[in-house]
Image: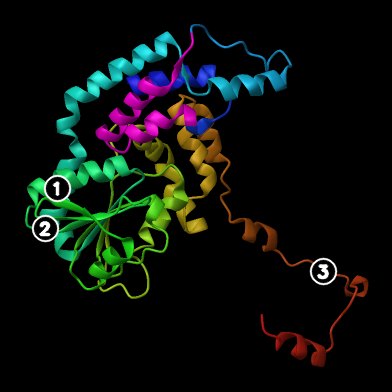
Amino acid sequence: MLAEEFCRSLGQRLKGSGFLKTLLLRRVGSTIQAGRLTAQKMLDSWQNIDAPLFDAESEGDEEFAAEIAAGTSRSLTPTERQLLDRFVQSLEANQERDPKYAVVLDCLRRQRCLERGCIIFSQYHDSVRWLAEQLVSDLPDERLAIYAGAGKSGIFEHGRFRRAQREEIKAQVKRGELHLLLGTDAASEGLNRQRLGSLINLDLPWNPTRLEQRKGRIQRIGQMHDTVFVYDMRYVGSVEDRVHDLLSERLEDVYTLFGQVPDVLEDVWIEVAIGENERAKQLIDEVPRQHPFDIRYERIEKIDWERCARVLDDAAKREALSQGW
């Protein structure tokens, strides 16, 4: 895949910055549109360099290495620029056939997500806006809203978009006037939508906590439906798909143990993205098979109370426990 080849090239040249080295794969893992726009922005704004960077860090000059990283982290070699060019051309030829859209439409119609009320989450406004514009043409009678940050929120009605405050959008959802909401992670905190009974994850955040935060928008006290429908989307063969395969054998055990997927596993996505599968497997294997609390307190040890600085009598314990927090 051109995006992965580009990220491997960038990863070999740049030190650190796992996010920057995998930015393109994160975005194209969301939608074709987000990947295309990101690649084009990189072509338009990243500077050209003619040769591989001098590895100052390996030569012991860490200060010089830091200066190089600061000045060239957003740069492209001729080979990298060529890969990006080919990548953009490939996506432009296929952008009208993003398979995620057909699945979203099927969920909304045939699987009755729209009837139950639905929130669709993405990490990126590019993806949310693209999806909204597609849905408007296929669901012309349905009002839908974009819930995002930085003045990007608004409502589509009769094919037209008008900007709206997030409080207005939340109020309309609460009153049952809006059944379809498209949101970004940047705006998800504090968004409680118990009236909506289904959630579609258009993409999978590489930070597991964000996935839990999304689900928490509808799976909470006050939910009007007995069950909630959650659909996670990923492209076949993508980084997200391969990470899921790597985690599949232990995912249920990890979730049962911790109640969610630990944030440390975000590094697994990065290692897979840059082709370090063995390192990714090592990170998965390093996740404890027993909860740290249980490891620490699984056995009772004798305590020498005579060495304690202070032991409270019954009256003092009652007084201490009666104090407010």
Q: Residue 302, labelled with which disc? A: 3
The residue beneath circle 2 is 142
If you read the primary sequence from the N terminus, does the residue marked by circle 2 or circle 1 appear first?
1
CA–CA distance between discs 3 and 2?
A: 67 Å
**How many neighbours does mark 1 have within 10 angstroms: few (below 14), some (14-19), or many (20 or more)?**
some
Image marks 3 and 1: residues in contact by CB distance under 8 Å: no
Image marks 2 and 1: residues in contact by CB distance under 8 Å: yes
User: Which range of residues does the magenta coloring cover?
Assistant: 20-49
Q: Secondary structure at mark 3?
A: loop
Q: Is residue 206 visible?
A: yes
Residue 162 occupies which quadrant of the picture?
A: bottom left
Amino acid tagged 1: Leu
Magenta span main SS: helix
If you read the primary sequence from the N terminus, does the residue marked by circle 3 or circle 2 appear first?
2
Q: Residue 145: horizontal and vertical position, in percent? A: 23, 56
CA–CA distance between discs 2 and 1?
A: 9 Å
Residue pictured at 58% horizontal, 41% vertical: 286
Which residue is at the far bottom?
315
The residue beneath circle 1 is 135
